[in-house]
Image (tube, rainbow, N blue to C red):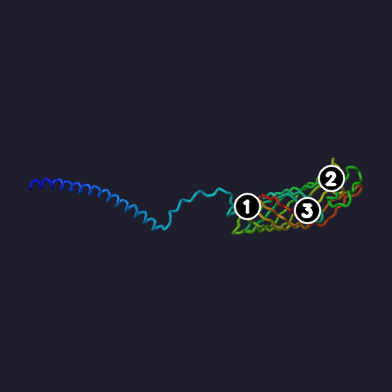
Amino acid sequence: MTARSLRLALPLLFALCLALVGGSARAAPSTGLKTGGSVDTSGASGQASTSGKAPKLPPGPKSSGFELPERVYGGNAISALMPAQVAFVGYMPRVRLGFQYDRQLFKQHWAYVGVAALFDRGDYRTFKESVCGLGNTSDACGKGTVAGVDAWAGWAYKWYLPDNPYLVPIARVGVGGGWWKYPKVTGTRIQAIESSWSISVRGGGGLRLFLLEDLAIGLDVNLAIGFTRSKKRALAMETERFSRFLLGMEILPLIVEYRF
């Protein structure tokens, strides 16, 4: 009886041992995974609770589009000034191609000097003469080319706009004088007036738009008030000199300025 009971108990005991060993083997990996998962989850959760939002991405490359400058150079400037001027009273050659040098004196205060070539084409009517003065020959009163030179100097105030530093309004005042020769055809004068020179006070203003720190485009409008002195020699007459009041305007919408 005892041996029979032992034979029945041994298989049951062996089965129980196998069951216990199998349960322990399954429990060990489960415990390791639980521990590792707890650490990872805790780290992720701690990061989320600390930042309160998704992590920032690194900034992308800056835009390569054109931008107006945030500052402009001072000190010196060279400008190309063109193309026209007009006289309301008296006469000035209408085409004007010039260069101007500006020097910064103190903050917004600048001094400037300039020189220009003057051109025109016309006849005695263009030059505000009532008659040709050289008779009625076929070539005596035709059209021809006027050529001369003009020079000026003055003072300018150039504003600084903190919110728009690339825009520079300008006010200026100065004095200038010019000289020009009236036209000839095949070496013979075609009107009585030979040459003129002028002196004028010039005041006005303009605007510059800087596309780069040292390069701008812009416009100027200046009023000229003064007089001209001319030499005239009519047919079979002695040389005559006379003066005229001058009121004109320089209209210079094509300006390129370089600063350095």
Q: Which mark is residue 94?
A: none
* Residue pictured at 75% horizontal, 50% vertical: 84
Query: Callout 2: few (<14), some (14-19), or many (20+) C-alpha neighbours within 10 Å?
Result: some
Check whether the beta carbons of the residues at disc 2 and disc 3 lie within 8 A of each other.
Answer: no
The residue labelled by disc 3 is: 86
* Residue pictured at 37% horizontal, 54% vertical: 44
- Between 26 and 74, the one nearer to me in the picture: 26
Q: Earlier in the sequence, mark 2 or mark 1?
A: 2
Q: Where residue 54 appears, x then y in whole percent?
A: 43, 54
Instruction: Report how far apart the C-alphas of labels 2 and 1 lie in the structure.
Output: 41 Å
* Residue pictured at 13% horizontal, 46% vertical: 10
Q: Earlier in the sequence, mark 2 or mark 3?
A: 3
Check whether the beta carbons of the residues at disc 2 and disc 1 lie within 8 A of each other.
Answer: no
- Between 175 and 146, the one nearer to me in the picture: 146
Instruction: Report how far apart the C-alphas of labels 2 and 3 lie in the structure.
Output: 19 Å
How many marks can you see?
3
The residue labelled by disc 2 is: 143
Tell me which amino acid carries mark 3. Val
Q: Earlier in the sequence, mark 3 or mark 1?
A: 3
The residue labelled by disc 1 is: 210
